[in-house]
Image (cartoon, rainbow, N blue to C red):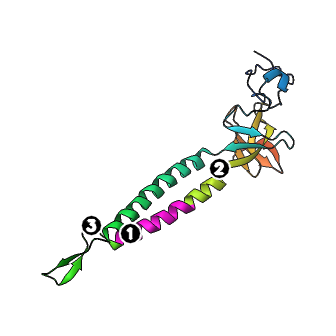
Amino acid sequence: MPYCEKCGSKIRESASFCPSCGAKIPDEINGNNGCVTDESIYQDDESGVVFKYNSASIGGIIVACGTLAVSVSTIITQGNASQHKFWDPSDGTYITPGYNPGSITFFVILAILALIILVVSIKKLRIKCKYVECPYCQKTTVIPCDAQSCDCDVCGQKILITNGKPERFHYKEKE
């Protein structure tokens, strides 16, 4: 098993970056020719920007797709039911069994909301992040670029971001 040239930590042979310090592993060590092996992070070599995948967005995409599928299926079923009209001699009107205009309206609105959720979830799927040193454990962690605070991926402590620099998070006690 190879070791990181920067911090000396053990690394997987297929790793592109050190899990402890975030240093890029040269291709001759990992031999993966720049392929991304970690499914949760991707780093652009030129700019040093890291993208993390937002699990809430993935859930939103799954729920929105399921809701959209059910809505479209119901709208099609109701549309087909509206084509079958029968004369009711007792009322002197046409009846359409299984057709409910309120149901179509509801599922059209639901489909529109599912599309909105799908678009928003796709836009928030990747979060732009950067590597910083945790002020608690002094290990490299990944924080969102526009965050004011976040948790360290290594030790789990709350990190406060002030002017782009990580600091210890201190709660103000009530007097």
Q: Magenta span covers which residues?
A: 102-116
Q: Any magenta on residue 113?
A: yes
Q: Which type of secondary structure does the marked residue at label 2 adopt?
A: loop
Q: Is residue 30 in sight in this rendering?
A: yes
Of circles 3 and 2, the one toward us is 3
| CA–CA distance in space, label 2 to label 1 | 31 Å
Residue 89 image-quadrant placement: bottom left
The image shows residue 33, relative to residue 111, as above or below, that is above
Q: Counting residues from the N terminus, which is met first, the one under dot 3 or under dot 1?
A: 3
Based on the picture, tell me whether residue 72 belongs to the magenta stretch.
no
What residue is rendered at 27% in x and 66% in y? 98
Residue extending farthest left: 90
Distance from disc 3 to disc 2, alpha carbons, whole Å, reads 40 Å
- Judged from the image, the secondary structure of the residue bearing numbered disc 1 is helix
Residue type at mark 3 is Gly
Write down the residue under mark 3.
Answer: 98
Task: Pinpoint residue 77: horizontal percent, then vertical percent.
Answer: 35, 63
Location of the N terminus (image quadrant) = top right
User: Which disc number belongs to residue 104?
Assistant: 1
